[in-house]
Amino acid sequence: DSGVTQTPKHLITATGQRVTLRCSPRSGDLSVYWYQQSLDQGLQFLIQYYNGEERAKGNILERFSAQQFPDLHSELNLSSLELGDSALYFCASSDPTGYTFGSGTRLTVV
Amino acid sequence: GQNIDQPTEMTATEGAIVQINCTYQTSGFNGLFWYQQHAGEAPTFLSYNVLDGLEEKGRFSSFLSRSKGYSYLLLKELQMKDSASYLCAVRAAGNKLTFGGGTRVLVKP
C-alpha cells in the first residue's frame, strides 16, 4: 500500500457519459497530480493541485476537470466520454524527495 | 516545454547488465527520477538524481549529467522479474513531473 488511495479501481461506462475518479494523497502530502496512461503509452500529465489550488496544467481536455477539496482529496471529472478516453488514470502525491502513485483507475468506455 | 527521449524497447539476458539512456530538454530543471512499471500497475520509485554523478542502490544505479541533459539507469544482475517498463521523468519548476515514453525491458533466460 503506497498510501495514495484511488477509487474506483475499475470503471466501465458508455460513450457520452460522465464519471468521477477520486484520489486521497498520502497523509501529510499537500500536492496531487493526475496522469493518464493509454494502452502501451507513457504517462501524460493532466493537472496538479497544491493545497486546494491548481498549480499546473498539462494537455487536459476541456471535457475534463478536477478539483482538490479542503481535506486534500481530489476528484477528476471526465464528461462526454469517448472511446479514446479509455485508459489508466493515476494520481500521485509528493514530498520533497519524490512522488508516490496510487494503484490507478482503469476506465473503459464502450 | 519539455522533451524527454528514451529507447522504446531493450532485450537482455538474465544475469547480464542493461543500460537505459534518457536525454531531456527542459527549463527550470529540478531533478530526474526513474520509475519501474509492470503492465497495468502503478509506477514504483527507483531513483532520484538532482546533482551530477552516480547514485547506487543495490542492483540499480542512476547517473546524471545536467550539462548534457543526460541520464542513464543501469540494471545489474538482471532477473526475470526485472522485465518491465522503465520510465524516466524530469521535474521542472513548480514540481511538475513529466515522463518520457518509457523503455520496455524484456529479460530472457
Image: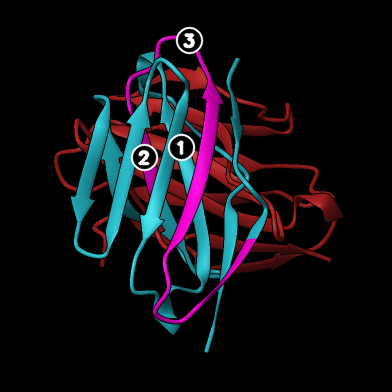
Chain colours: A red, B cyan
Over which residues does the magenta segment extend?
A: B10-34
Residue of label 1: B89
- Label 1 is placed on what type of residue? Ala
Q: Are marks 1 and 3 in contact (CB under 8 Å)?
A: no
Residue A57 visible, this angle: yes
Label 3: few (<14), some (14–19) or many (≥20) C-alpha neighbours in 10 Å: few
Q: Residue at x 44, y 19 (%)?
A: A54
Q: Depth check: B99 or A68 in front? A: B99
For the stretch drawn in magenta, the main secondary structure is strand
Residue of label 2: B33
Q: Depth check: A108 or B36 in front? A: B36
- Kindly identify which chain the residue marked by label 3 belongs to: B
Lower position in the chain sequence, tag 2 or tag 3: 3
Q: Residue furthest front?
A: B16
Q: Are marks 1 and 2 in contact (CB under 8 Å)?
A: yes
Query: Whole-percent x and y of residue A98?
Result: 26, 39
Task: Say which mark, if any, is on residue B27.
Answer: 3
Lower position in the chain sequence, tag 1 or tag 2: 2
Query: Whole-percent x and y of residue A14?
Result: 81, 62
Query: Whole-percent x and y of residue A83?
Result: 85, 55
- Label 3 is placed on what type of residue? Ser
Against B8, is B109 above or below?
below
